[in-house]
Amino acid sequence: MLGRVAVLLAMLVGSAAGDTLQGTVVEDHSNNPLASAEVRVYRVGIRQLAADLETDGTGRFTAAGLPAGDYRIEASKPNYVSATLRMSGVKGGLLIRLVRCGVVSGQVLDAQGQPVRGATVYAMPKPADGGPLRPFDALSQGNYTRVNDRGEYRLHGLAPGEYAVAVTYGASTATFGSTGGASVRAGLGSGAQFYPTNARPQFFAVSGGEEHHADFAIIPNTLYRVSGKVDRPAPNTEYWLALTTEDQPSLAAAVAETKTGGSFQFEGIAPGNYHLTASGPIGGYGGKGILEAAPYFGRGQVGVGGANVEGVSISMQKGRAVSFVLRSSVAKMPEGACPANANLTLMALEDWATKLDRSAEVNFQKEQIVEQLAPARFQMVVTELGVSCYQPEAAILDLSGALPEGPVVVLVAPAGSIQGKLTGTARPADFAVALMAADTTSGAQAVQVVFPDAEGRFGFGGLRPGAYRIAAQLAGEASRARWITDRARMIEIRIAAGGPTELELPAPPAKPNQ
C-alpha cells in the first residue's frame, strides 16, 4: 500500500535554473539527507520517463537537459512513504521531504511474564469517519505479525495516521487459517485484546519516524467452555465457527471446527457476550478458511459467565442473494467523469474465520445480483473508477438481519477540487501548501503539495471527496519545518464532489530558523 500512497512533502527555492533540475531528498522529521532514494521525473503529458535518478550520499540529485514544461517528480525509498511533487518549469534548489514510516513494538506476555507463543498482533487504522476498527484490508508483514519465541513483535511501515494495536492468541483465526486447527493453552485460553483494553483502545499517532511501545499482559478471568451442535444441511461436512465480541467484531476471540455429527466445542473462553457464527463446508485454508461452492451460514448470540455453556444449537442457511446498482451522489454527473462499469468488493467487517469477501462488476443501467452472501456486515468498496471518479464515503451493508428491499444503491461521485488563496503574507510564492488525506486507508493520495502564485492563488484537482487536512509552510531551502506534524497544526476541511471547494488559507508566521 505504501508504494501507492503519495505523500508529498516538498520545498522550492531559488530562481529558474534553465534546463537543469537539482534538488535534495531529506527525512522529514530529522532533516537528515537520504542517500539512495529513487527520483523519477516525468514531463506532464508524456508517458516515458524524462529522468530516472538516485540520490548520492548527501541526498542530492541532478537531471540536465530537460526542456521547459510542467513536471511530476516522484521520490521513494524503502520504509518511507513515497513523495510526489508537481511543478511548472525546470528549477533548482528543490527539497523533497520523505516521511519515515512509524513503528509499534513490544511484547505479549502472560500473567507469569512468559511469552504467549503463537500470538498475532495487528495494527488497526483509525477510520476518519469513526467507523469500526479493523485490520488493514491487505494484510502484509508490517501491519500484522506473529510474535517470536520471546513474545516480541514489531509492526512497521505505518503511514501517517492513528493506529490501535490488538493481539489474538489461542485458537485464533490466524492460527486456524495457517494450520487448519489450533490448540489452547490451559489457563490462558483464547481471546482478542486491544491495548490497553478492549473498551478503550489507545491510538498511537504517526506523523513520521515515531517508534511507539506497547506491551500486552494476557491475564484472563475464569475461563469457560462453550459447546453445542451445528444443524448441518449435509452429513460428513466440516464447518468453522467463531466467537466475536459485540464491541470489536473484526477479530475473533476464538475459532472452533465441527466434529463427527456436527458437534463443536470452544475451550478457554472469558466471560462476556459474543456473536457466534458458523460457515462451511470448508474446502481448505489460506489465511482464513476457504469455503466450498454453495456455502451455508449461521449466526447467533452466546452469553458466557458463571458456568460452562452447553447445548448451543446453530442452524445453517444458504447464502443470501442481493442486487446492486451504481448511482451518482450528485444531481448531475459530468459526462465521462465516471465509467459505465466498476468493480464492487464486499469486505466483511466481522471475523467469521472464513473468507466471506465477494466481488462483482456493477453498472449504472442493470442491477447486478451477488449470490451466496453471508448474513454479516460488509463494507462496500468500489474500484476501477478511473482517475476522475471516486466512492465519496465509506458504505456499510448490514445483512445480519432482514434483507434490503430492492437493489442496494452504490454511490460514486466525480472528483472534487480546491480553489484556494494564501493570505497573511506579502510573498506567497515563498510558501508551499500541503494537503493530506485524513484517512490513509481511503485510497486517496495521502499528501499533495502545490506552490501559490505571486497573488497567492493555488489549486488542487482530481480529489477524492471526503476529509482532508491542509497547511502552508515556507518553502525555502533553509526551512527545517516538518510538513507532516500533529493534527492541531493543520486545518481540517471536507472536499465536496463534482465542484471546487473555495478556501482562504492563512500563512504561518515566519520564524528565525525558517
Image (cartoon, helix red, strand yellow):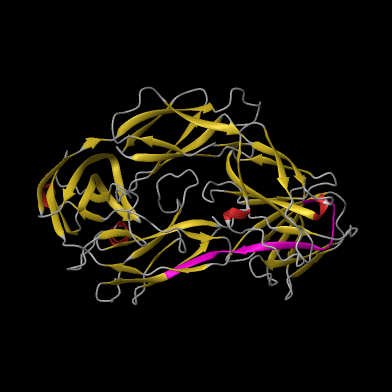
- Snapshot quadrant of residue 267: bottom left
The percent coordinates of residue 374 (x first, y second) are: 30, 38
Q: Decide if residue 161 is on the left or right side of residue 233.
A: right
Residue at the extreme right of the image, as rendered: 18
Q: Is residue 95 magenta?
A: yes
Up the image or down, 145 lies above or below 237; here it is below
The percent coordinates of residue 247 (x first, y second) are: 31, 48
Q: Is residue 198 visible?
A: yes
Quick one: 51 or 403, which is closer to the camera?
Answer: 403
Name the magenta segment's main secondary structure.
strand
Magenta residues (range): 87-105
Image point 27% across, 55% down: which residue? 253
Q: Is residue 177 magenta?
A: no
Quarter of the picture holding the C terminus:
bottom right
Quarter of the picture holding the N terminus:
bottom right
The percent coordinates of residue 397 (x first, y second) are: 39, 35
- Snapshot quadrant of residue 194: bottom left
Number of numbered discs overlaid on the protein picture:
0
Quick one: 179 or 330, which is closer to the camera?
Answer: 330
The percent coordinates of residue 355 (x first, y second) are: 34, 47
Image point 72% across, 66% down: which residue? 480
- Snapshot quadrant of residue 510: bottom right
Q: Is residue 240 visible?
A: no
Quick one: 317 or 237, which is closer to the camera?
Answer: 317
Q: Decide if residue 54 is on the left or right side of residue 122.
A: right
